[in-house]
Amino acid sequence: MRIAVDLNRCQGYAQCAFLAPETFAMHGEEALLYNPEVDEAHREKLLQAAAACPVQAILVDAVDVPAKAVSGGR
C-alpha cells in the first residue's frame, strides 16, 4: 500500500505519528518523516491516522490515481 503526505499542507500536529508510529515520525517539532510504502497489515492504523489529520494532508492509496482525479479535474 502506498501513501503520500502533502508536506506543504502538513502543520506538524503529529496526530499521525501518535496513531501510526510505524509509518510516521516527527523530526524536531515540525518536520514529518514517513515511509511511503506501508505494509497492508497496518492499513487500519493508517486510515485512522489519515482521518485524524486536522489538515487532511495524508493520501492513502491515491498515489496511483491520475493527477487529474486527485486534484478535482483542474
Image (cartoon, rainbow, N blue to C red):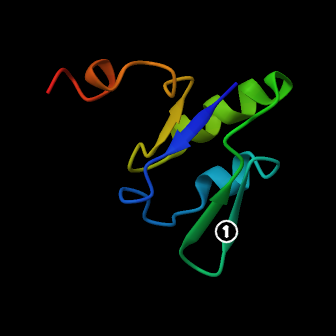
- The amino acid type, in three-letter code, at marker 1 is Met
Along the viewing direction, whichever of 67 and 33 lies nearer the viewer: 67
- Which image quarter is the C terminus in? top left
Determine which residue is flagged by label 1. 26
The quadrant where residue 50 appears: top right
Q: Position of residue 6 (x, y in %)?
A: 43, 49
Q: Residue at x 45, y 58 (%)?
A: 7
Q: Residue at x 68, y 34 (%)?
A: 46
Q: Residue at x 82, y 48 (%)?
A: 22
Compared across the picture, whether 30 is left or right of 55 comes to right
Q: Position of residue 42 (x, y in %)?
A: 80, 30
Along the viewing direction, whichever of 41 and 65 lies nearer the viewer: 65
Compared across the picture, whether 46 is left or right of 13 comes to right
Along the viewing direction, whichever of 14 and 38 lies nearer the viewer: 38
Q: Residue furthest left?
A: 74
Badge count: 1
